[in-house]
Image (cartoon, rainbow, N blue to C red):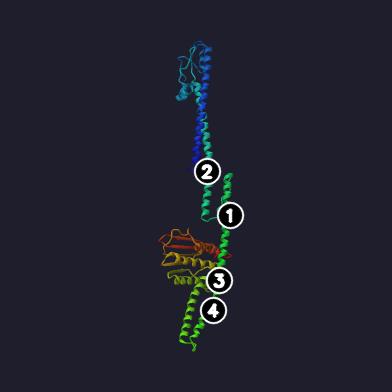
Amino acid sequence: MTVYRKISLSMLAVFIVIYMLGALLYTQQARHDVQRELNGVSGLAQSLGAPANLPASVVERVRHLRPVGGIEIASADKVPGWFSTMIAGQTSLPEVHGWQVDPSDEVEEIWESFLLISVAYAVGMALCFLALFVMIRRGVRTLASLSGAMAAVSEGHLASRLPRQGEQELDSLVCRFNAMVEALESEQQTVSRLLNELLQLQDREREHIARVLHDDLGQYLTGIRAQSRSLLYDPELSGRQKQQALDLAEHCETIQKHFRHLLQDLHPLVMEQLGLGSAIRHLTEQWQQLSGLDCHLAMDERLPEFTGEQQTHLYRFLQEALNNVSRHANASCATLAVARNDKELSIEVSDDGVGSNALPDNAGLGIRSMRERARCLGGEVQFSSRMGQGTRIRLAVPVVRLYPTPGGAL
């Protein structure tokens, strides 16, 4: 039941009780007034004498008295019988000197006053209900706006604000809501800034570690492998020693192979050398080799000219998406589609795995980092997954927003 109905029913019950009490008091007072009027009229009849001794014009003008056996006043038909009985009673009217005491005209006046008061009471009650409806409607409208704004906030739209209200209580509630949303927005901006700085720091540390490993450890491995190969041509070594040198060279080659995969995970040097498109192709090839799964790549060659930071965010996004497929999807293949139109760059990663109905509600650190990287790119990411139907991740990055020209066109 709505608030308006509850309040209306309560007020209606109060109005009915007040009306019944007022009607009871009114009828009690009316009965007392009629009885007092009848007593006074009886005294008047005694002082007037018999109606036959008076002029006809005087007899017709006397109130509450009529000659015995005369014509009854027709106005009594205008008053309901139950009301007349309640006011005047059912006792036989007294006769005094040929006069019949008749309170019908007095009862009629009381009935007309009762109707007038009842109508005025009904109009007042209707106006009260109308005012109540207007006020509650305004309050409910504000509460509905508040509910909609809270739903928007729960979906992540922290820019929702409510206008000030004329009522003090509602305005206080709206002000508190706006202050809460502003605080949440400020905290979200702070967290997002910290996450962005953390991701940038992580990427810089990865790049630094990758360069140190490539320049130092990589050179040492290459030197060890070259020296081991050179020992094969030393005539002073025995066959057993040459075999050991050959094994050492092969071990170094194996270490270098895994080392290259590690460097690619830490920092894709191919992206610096050949660009984002080549890095994405190399990522899919490496992912197929390591995971043993097929990856169908469909990529538009018209990739935007990302900055180095944006390229890193996009590459890490795809890397995390493919890693989730190999770790959690239990899939046989994956599809990576990269397309561009005049407005946005669309990237979609899908698989034929088991799927999950709880994604992305049970999001882990990987999905959270993907969301943050999408936010850093100014894009929007959507996760779609159903049990037994696989998972689809779509990232839409607005191109105009990322790369505006002075004229406003791409």
Can residue 207 be spotted in the picture?
Answer: yes
Residue bearing mark 1: 183
Residue 147 is situated, as x and y percent measured from the top left of the image, at: 52, 49
In this view, the residue in front, 18 or 67, is 18
Give the distance between the C-alpha atoms of the residues marked 3 and 4, in whole angstroms. Answer: 19 Å
Q: Helix or strand or loop: what does disc 4 sit on?
A: helix
Instruction: Please tell me whether residue 220 is drawn above or below residue 49 in the rendered image.
Output: below
Q: Amino acid at mark 3?
A: Glu
- Looking at this view, is 371 or 92 the one in front? 371
Q: Position of residue 403 (x, y in %)?
A: 55, 65
> What amino acid is found at the position of numbered circle 2 in the picture?
Arg
Where does the C terminus fall, quadrant-wise?
bottom right
Mark found first going from the N terminus, 2 or 1: 2
Q: Which residue is labeled 4 in the image?
A: 220
- What is the secondary structure assignment of the residue under circle 2? helix
- Residue under numbered circle 2: 137
Residue density around tag 1, few if under 14, some if 14–19, many if 20 or more, within 10 Å: few
Identify which residue is drawn at 52% across, 45% down.
140
- In this rendering, the answer to whether 113 lies above or below 368 is above
**Given this view, does label 1 or label 4 mark the residue nearer the observer?**
4
Instruction: Give the CA separation, mark 2 to mark 1.
Output: 30 Å
Mark sitting earlier along the chain (2/3): 2
The label nearer to you, 4 versus 2, is: 4
Alpha carbon of mark 2 to alpha carbon of mark 3: how far?
Answer: 61 Å
Q: CA distance from mark 1 to mark 4?
A: 54 Å
Residue at mark 3 = 207
Q: Does the CB distance between marks 1 and 3 fall below 8 Å? A: no
The location of residue 304, given as percent across then percent down, is 53, 68
Work out how far the residue at label 1 is from the one at label 3, CA to CA, in angstroms: 36 Å
